[in-house]
Image (spheres, rainbow, N blue to C red):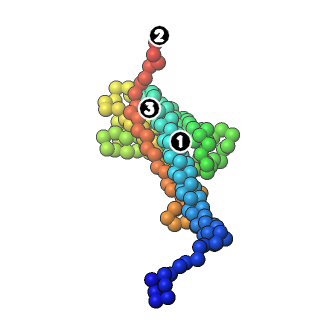
Amino acid sequence: MNRFGPIVFPPLSRGRASGQSLAEFAIIVPVVLLLLLAIADMGRLYTSAVAVEAAGREAADFGSFDSSNWTAANFNTTVDEMRRRACTAAAGSHLEGYETTDPLNNTTCSNPTFHCTLELSGTTVDCASSGGFVGTTDCSLATTEPPCTVHVEMDYDFRTFLAFPPMPESIAIVRHSLFRVSNLAPATP
């Protein structure tokens, strides 16, 4: 109250109230849209990581299925088939940004990239140059104990929808699949 009597505010006109609502709407909508795009990116990131993991597992599974894959006569063919299987699995999962130089057969891919090593007791050798050996141990022998491990690494460059801070332009997805070499016989009925 002041010396002239109570302070009375005039009622807000309908035009001013709707203008306020419009201003609030204009502020909130972009924030909600950014949140929705971020949620969509996280979903895409997750499905891409699963697809890259599956591609690596497909390759490692093939390389480890039979020790004869690593004989001197077979190891180059085995590595090529592992790469083809990984790239085919990645292409089949419709990875956004999948890149290959051979779209017909998917024998190679550059996004994701494929790398394979044979491992035994802490020693690691690139599959393509191993000759089926880790050090002096022959991985092609079914009696090798402990067995050699086929390690496939798949690297994928995931590109985000929104490329402004704090969202990066791309996120590197790296997945490792390790399988021990074993001679698995098909189940008999």
Identity, as a three-letter code, of the amino acid under mark 3: Ser
Mark 3 closeness class: few <14, some 14–19, many ≥20 residues within 10 Å: many
Quadrant in which residue 137 is drawn:
top left
Task: Return the x and y of residue 103 as percentages of the image width and height.
Answer: 67, 43
Q: Position of residue 113 (x, y in %)?
A: 54, 48
Q: Which mark is residue 22?
A: none
- Which badge, 2 or 3, is on the more N-terminal residue? 3
| Residue where numbered disc 2 is placed | 189
- Is residue 50 left or right of 88 when viewed as pictured? left
Residue 112 left/right relative to 2? right
Q: Which dot marks residue 51? A: 1
Image position of 81 with respect to 101: above or below: above
What residue lies at 37% left-to-right and 41% top-to-bottom? 119
Tell us which disc is closer to us: 3 or 1: 1
Q: Alpha-carbon neighbours of circle 1 within 10 Å: few (<14), some, or many (≥20)?
A: many
> What percent of the width, then of the height, locates residue 185?
44, 19
Query: Which callout, 3 or 1, points at the residue further toward the start of the chain?
Result: 1
Query: Quick one: SS at disc 3?
Result: helix
Q: Nearer the viewer, residue 5 or 29?
A: 5
Which residue is at 60% across, 72% downward?
A: 12
Marks 2/3: CA–CA distance: 24 Å
* Residue 64, numbered circle: 3
**Residue 57 appears anywhere in the view:** yes
